[in-house]
Amino acid sequence: AIRRVAPTLSSYITFRAPAPRGSSVLARDGNYSILYGYRVQVFNSNLPNAKSEAYARAEAIRRVAPTLSSYITFRAPFWRLTVGNFTSQEEARSARARLMVALPAWGRESYVVREKVRILNYTEPHASEE
Protein backbone atom coordinates (compact mmCIF):
# COMPACT_ATOMS: atom_id res chain seq x y z
CA ALA A 1 0.00 0.00 0.00
CA ILE A 2 1.29 3.41 -0.94
CA ARG A 3 0.75 6.04 1.68
CA ARG A 4 0.35 9.59 0.42
CA VAL A 5 1.32 12.40 2.71
CA ALA A 6 -0.17 15.81 2.13
CA PRO A 7 2.53 18.41 1.57
CA THR A 8 3.02 20.79 4.44
CA LEU A 9 3.35 24.53 4.17
CA SER A 10 7.01 24.35 5.14
CA SER A 11 7.77 22.21 2.09
CA TYR A 12 6.80 25.17 -0.13
CA ILE A 13 8.80 27.77 1.77
CA THR A 14 12.51 28.11 1.30
CA PHE A 15 14.31 29.65 4.22
CA ARG A 16 17.16 31.97 3.46
CA ALA A 17 19.62 33.15 6.05
CA PRO A 18 19.32 36.87 6.75
CA ALA A 19 21.89 39.16 5.18
CA PRO A 20 24.95 39.43 7.37
CA ARG A 21 25.03 42.44 9.64
CA GLY A 22 28.76 42.89 8.99
CA SER A 23 30.01 46.02 7.32
CA SER A 24 31.28 44.73 3.99
CA VAL A 25 32.28 47.44 1.54
CA LEU A 26 29.80 47.96 -1.31
CA ALA A 27 31.90 50.50 -3.24
CA ARG A 28 34.80 52.90 -2.93
CA ASP A 29 34.80 56.61 -3.75
CA GLY A 30 38.30 58.01 -3.38
CA ASN A 31 39.25 57.70 0.28
CA TYR A 32 35.64 56.90 1.20
CA SER A 33 34.04 53.48 1.46
CA ILE A 34 30.32 53.00 0.89
CA LEU A 35 28.79 50.32 3.12
CA TYR A 36 25.65 49.55 5.06
CA GLY A 37 25.74 51.31 8.38
CA TYR A 38 23.57 53.58 10.49
CA ARG A 39 22.37 57.17 10.60
CA VAL A 40 20.09 59.11 12.91
CA GLN A 41 16.85 60.17 11.24
CA VAL A 42 15.74 63.43 12.82
CA PHE A 43 12.98 64.55 10.44
CA ASN A 44 10.48 62.94 8.07
CA SER A 45 7.45 64.77 6.71
CA ASN A 46 5.18 65.23 3.71
CA LEU A 47 3.61 68.54 4.81
CA PRO A 48 3.76 71.52 2.40
CA ASN A 49 6.57 73.16 4.41
CA ALA A 50 8.59 69.93 4.82
CA LYS A 51 11.44 70.96 2.50
CA SER A 52 12.12 74.25 4.28
CA GLU A 53 11.76 72.54 7.67
CA ALA A 54 14.31 69.87 6.69
CA TYR A 55 16.84 72.53 5.63
CA ALA A 56 16.19 74.57 8.79
CA ARG A 57 16.77 71.53 10.99
CA ALA A 58 19.93 70.63 9.08
CA GLU A 59 21.25 74.13 9.81
CA ALA A 60 20.33 73.80 13.50
CA ILE A 61 22.24 70.50 13.66
CA ARG A 62 25.24 72.11 11.92
CA ARG A 63 25.35 74.72 14.70
CA VAL A 64 25.02 72.13 17.51
CA ALA A 65 27.14 69.31 16.04
CA PRO A 66 29.32 70.63 13.19
CA THR A 67 31.18 67.31 12.78
CA LEU A 68 28.01 65.38 11.85
CA SER A 69 27.16 65.25 8.15
CA SER A 70 23.52 65.99 7.26
CA TYR A 71 21.66 64.29 4.41
CA ILE A 72 18.37 65.65 3.10
CA THR A 73 16.53 63.27 0.78
CA PHE A 74 13.23 63.42 -1.05
CA ARG A 75 11.36 60.20 -1.78
CA ALA A 76 7.93 61.25 -2.94
CA PRO A 77 6.06 62.46 -1.00
CA PHE A 78 8.45 62.60 1.99
CA TRP A 79 11.33 64.92 2.86
CA ARG A 80 13.75 63.26 5.24
CA LEU A 81 16.78 64.45 7.21
CA THR A 82 19.35 61.97 8.47
CA VAL A 83 22.69 62.73 10.12
CA GLY A 84 25.98 60.93 10.62
CA ASN A 85 27.82 57.97 9.13
CA PHE A 86 28.18 55.19 11.68
CA THR A 87 29.39 51.63 11.24
CA SER A 88 27.63 50.36 14.36
CA GLN A 89 24.19 50.83 15.83
CA GLU A 90 25.78 51.64 19.19
CA GLU A 91 27.67 54.62 17.70
CA ALA A 92 24.45 55.91 16.13
CA ARG A 93 22.52 55.51 19.41
CA SER A 94 25.22 57.43 21.25
CA ALA A 95 25.11 60.26 18.68
CA ARG A 96 21.31 60.34 18.91
CA ALA A 97 21.51 60.64 22.69
CA ARG A 98 23.95 63.56 22.41
CA LEU A 99 21.71 65.26 19.84
CA MET A 100 18.65 64.84 22.04
CA VAL A 101 20.43 66.57 24.93
CA ALA A 102 21.06 69.57 22.66
CA LEU A 103 17.71 69.41 20.80
CA PRO A 104 15.21 67.72 23.16
CA ALA A 105 12.11 68.83 21.22
CA TRP A 106 13.09 66.48 18.36
CA GLY A 107 13.44 63.40 20.55
CA ARG A 108 10.06 61.83 19.78
CA GLU A 109 10.64 61.78 16.04
CA SER A 110 14.30 60.71 15.91
CA TYR A 111 15.35 57.15 15.19
CA VAL A 112 18.43 55.15 14.32
CA VAL A 113 18.03 53.86 10.76
CA ARG A 114 20.08 51.44 8.67
CA GLU A 115 21.23 52.68 5.27
CA LYS A 116 24.26 53.16 3.05
CA VAL A 117 26.90 55.36 4.66
CA ARG A 118 30.22 56.91 3.60
CA ILE A 119 33.16 56.16 5.89
CA LEU A 120 36.55 57.87 5.43
CA ASN A 121 39.58 55.54 5.28
CA TYR A 122 37.55 52.46 6.30
CA THR A 123 39.38 49.16 6.65
CA GLU A 124 37.35 45.98 6.88
CA PRO A 125 37.67 44.02 10.11
CA HIS A 126 39.24 40.62 9.60
CA ALA A 127 36.87 37.69 9.65
CA SER A 128 37.27 35.53 12.73
CA GLU A 129 38.74 32.13 12.02
CA GLU A 130 36.69 29.23 13.26
Image (spheres, rainbow, N blue to C red):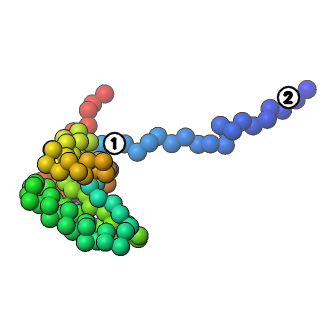
* Quadrant housing the C terminus: top left
Residue 29 image offset from top left, x and y in percent:
19, 64
Q: Quadrant of the N terminus?
A: top right
Dot 2: element: loop
10, above or below 27, in the image: above
Q: Residue at x 65, y 37 (%)?
A: 10
**Whole-percent x and y of residue 91?**
20, 42
Up-down: is 71 above or below 37? below
Position of residue 21 in the picture relative to residue 85 (left or right): right
Q: Is residue 17 above or below residue 84?
A: above
Q: Kindly state the secondary structure of the residue where label 1 is placed.
A: loop
Q: Residue at x 18, y 63 (%)?
A: 58
The mark lying in front, picked from 1 and 2, is 1
Q: Nearer the viewer, residue 94 or 126?
A: 94
Residue 91 seen: no
Residue under label 1, please give it. 21
Nearest the camera: 63 or 116? 63
Name the kind of residue labelled 2 in the image.
Arg
In-front residue for pair 2/15: 15
What residue is disc 2 on?
3
Q: Position of residue 86 (x, y in %)?
A: 21, 48
The quadrant in which residue 31 appears is: bottom left
Q: Identity of the amino acid at label 1? A: Arg
The answer to whether 4 appears left or right of 80 in the picture is: right
